[in-house]
Image (spheres, rainbow, N blue to C red):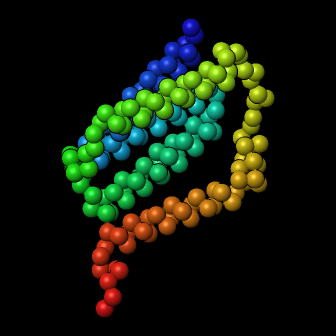
């Protein structure tokens, strides 16, 4: 086991642990901070795998923008910030569905690869990745930005009742 294997395992455990804390904590802001830790660990995984550009995009887009947008929208809609039991559901059903989905995906991966080694693709460059994103994927990229803007405007309208009221 090499040093990079140990680092991958440690970062994977941090990501899984923080992801579990995101869905089990009762504090909305703490859930957002645990999400930052989880996404940061995933960015670390990308760094260990040699995908520096994807790691920085992960940090800038997901940690820097999406989490801030989620927390900003939650605070704008006056959602309870502290511990809340208002929307509690039975935990056994979620554990059953999550465990079943996890086992199903594990079985699917084992069946798909059959423990065989997969050949590594040709190493990419930032120039090739940028060309692919801004030539073939520019429309979905722009649609996503408009969708996020519409979600933010919708959160503002929902949180301020005097905007939607007719005079």
Q: Position of residue 121 (x, y in %)?
A: 76, 28
In the image, is 4 to the left or to the right of 64? right
Residue 62 visible to an observer of this rendering: yes
Kindly identify the residue that appears in the image at 61 percent across and 25 percent down. Answer: 109
Position of the N terminus, as image quadrant, is top right
Number of marks: 0
Q: Is residue 41 above or below residue 165?
A: above
In the image, is 66 to the left or to the right of 145? left
Residue 18 visible to an observer of this rendering: no
Kindly identify the residue that appears in the image at 30 percent across and 47 percent down. Answer: 29
Residue found farthest to the bottom = 167
Q: Is residue 51 above or below residue 157?
A: above
Kindly identify the residue that appears in the image at 71 percent across and 50 percent down. Answer: 133
Q: Is residue 107 above or below residue 145?
A: above
**Pick the front one: 115 or 51:** 115
Q: Position of residue 134 (x, y in %)?
A: 72, 54
In the image, is 94 to the left or to the right of 109? left
Q: Quadrant of residue 163?
A: bottom left
Q: Position of residue 118 (x, y in %)?
A: 72, 20
Position of the C terminus, as image quadrant, is bottom left
Q: Is residue 144 above or below residue 26?
A: below
Q: Position of residue 50 (x, y in %)?
A: 64, 28
């Amino acid at each position: 086991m090499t040093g990079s294997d140990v680092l991958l395992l440690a970062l994977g455990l941090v990501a899984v642990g923080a992801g579990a804390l995101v869905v089990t904590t009762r504090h909305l802001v703490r859930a957002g901070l645990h999400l930052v830790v989880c996404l940061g660990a995933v960015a670390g995984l990308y760094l260990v795998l040699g995908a520096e550009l994807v790691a920085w995009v992960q940090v800038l887009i997901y940690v820097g923008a999406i989490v801030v947008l989620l927390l900003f929208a939650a605070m704008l809609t006056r959602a309870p910030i502290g511990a809340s039991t208002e929307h509690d559901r039975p935990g056994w059903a979620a554990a059953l569905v999550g465990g079943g989905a996890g086992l199903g995906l594990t079985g699917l991966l084992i069946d798909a690869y059959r423990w065989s080694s997969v050949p590594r693709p040709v190493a990419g460059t930032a120039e090739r990745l940028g060309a692919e994103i801004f030539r073939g994927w520019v429309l979905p990229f722009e649609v996503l930005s408009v969708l996020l803007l519409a979600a933010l405007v919708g959160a503002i309208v929902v949180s301020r009742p005097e905007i939607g009221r007719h005079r």
